[in-house]
Image (cartoon, rainbow, N blue to C red):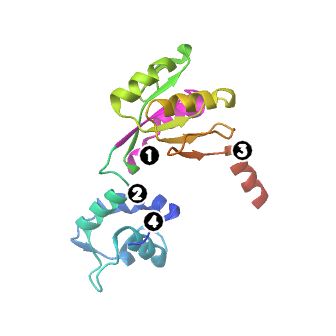
């Protein structure tokens, strides 16, 4: 198998949802492409990267392909994350159900005292000072930052001090993390500016 590209990884949940409704023992990349309205070459490449090549004139064993896609998406290794900053963006991420396609769950959010309670989906929002105990009691390894830039580095430090080894930040500031901590920084305004240049 080859390394699965980010673009292919984004299509795998679509293949998986379709395959779970298929009643046949075997299925071809051609059939998947037809049913999903995608290019056959693209589907073949995606499946080859995630699961190896299908067998000539037979395709893939449906059950085995489902299992391989679930492994590739991390669904067999359920991972819980926490979020700091329960404003509009934070709450939208907290209640987004699509993370489960990748074996991820945002277990709780943390914010200032006047924001505590629950989200629309019933997820808990705790005071920031409870983050330490929650991370340690639940083995949390992923943190998401949606606080204003003024508070982002302090929150980032709090996360890494309490066992978080991967951070996804939406704060418009370059964060510093210790060696061994993975950091992905999103800049929504920059992404929109890039799109604006394309029109």
**Callout 1 touching callout 2 (CB < 8 Å):** yes
**Callout 4 touching callout 3 (CB < 8 Å):** no
C-alpha gap between disc 4 and disc 2: 13 Å
What residue is disc 1 on? 98
**For marks 4 and 3 on the same chain, the one whose residue lies earlier in the sequence:** 4
Image point 46% across, 24% down: which residue? 131
Magenta-highlighted residues: 79-101
Quadrant of the image occupied by residue 82: top left
Residue sitting nearer the eye, 47 or 177? 177
Around disc 1, counting alpha carbons within 10 Å, would you say few (fewer than 14), some (14 to 19), or many (20 or more)? few
Q: Is residue 38 magenta?
A: no
Instruction: Name the secondary structure under disc 2.
Output: helix
**For marks 1 and 3 on the same chain, the one whose residue lies earlier in the sequence:** 1
What residue is disc 4 on? 4
Around disc 3, counting alpha carbons within 10 Å, would you say few (fewer than 14), some (14 to 19), or many (20 or more)? few
Residue sitting nearer the eye, 141 or 96? 141
**Is there any visible trace of residue 118 in the rendered image?**
no
What residue is disc 2 on? 13
Instruction: Name the secondary structure under disc 1.
Output: helix
Image point 58% across, 40% down: which residue? 177
C-alpha gap between disc 1 and disc 3: 23 Å
**For marks 1 and 2 on the same chain, the one whose residue lies earlier in the sequence:** 2
- Up the image or down, 167 lies above or below 59; here it is above
What residue is disc 3 on? 189
Left or right of residue 128, residue 194 in this image: right
Instruction: State the image coordinates of residue 117 (x, y, percent, origin top left).
Output: 46, 18
**Callout 4 touching callout 1 (CB < 8 Å):** no
Q: What number is the disc on residue 155?
A: none
């Amino acid at each position: 198998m080859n390394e699965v590209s980010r673009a292919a990884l984004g299509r795998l949940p679509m293949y998986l949802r379709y395959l779970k409704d298929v009643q046949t023992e075997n299925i071809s990349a051609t059939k998947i492409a037809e049913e999903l309205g995608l290019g056959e070459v693209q589907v073949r490449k995606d499946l080859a990267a995630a699961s190896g090549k299908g067998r000539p004139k037979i395709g893939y064993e449906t059950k085995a392909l489902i299992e391989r896609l679930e492994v590739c998406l991390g669904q067999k290794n359920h991972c819980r994350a926490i979020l700091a900053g329960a404003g509009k963006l934070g709450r939208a991420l907290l209640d987004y159900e699509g993370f489960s396609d990748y074996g991820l769950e945002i277990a709780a959010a943390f914010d200032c005292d006047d924001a505590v309670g629950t989200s629309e989906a019933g997820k808990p929002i705790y005071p920031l000072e409870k983050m330490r105990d929650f991370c340690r009691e639940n083995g949390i390894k992923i943190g998401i930052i949606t606080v204003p830039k003024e508070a982002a580095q302090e929150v980032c430090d709090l996360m890494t001090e309490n066992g978080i080894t991967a951070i996804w930040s939406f704060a418009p500031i370059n964060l510093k993390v210790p060696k061994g901590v993975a950091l992905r920084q999103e800049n929504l305004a920059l992404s929109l500016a890039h799109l604006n240049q394309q029109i």
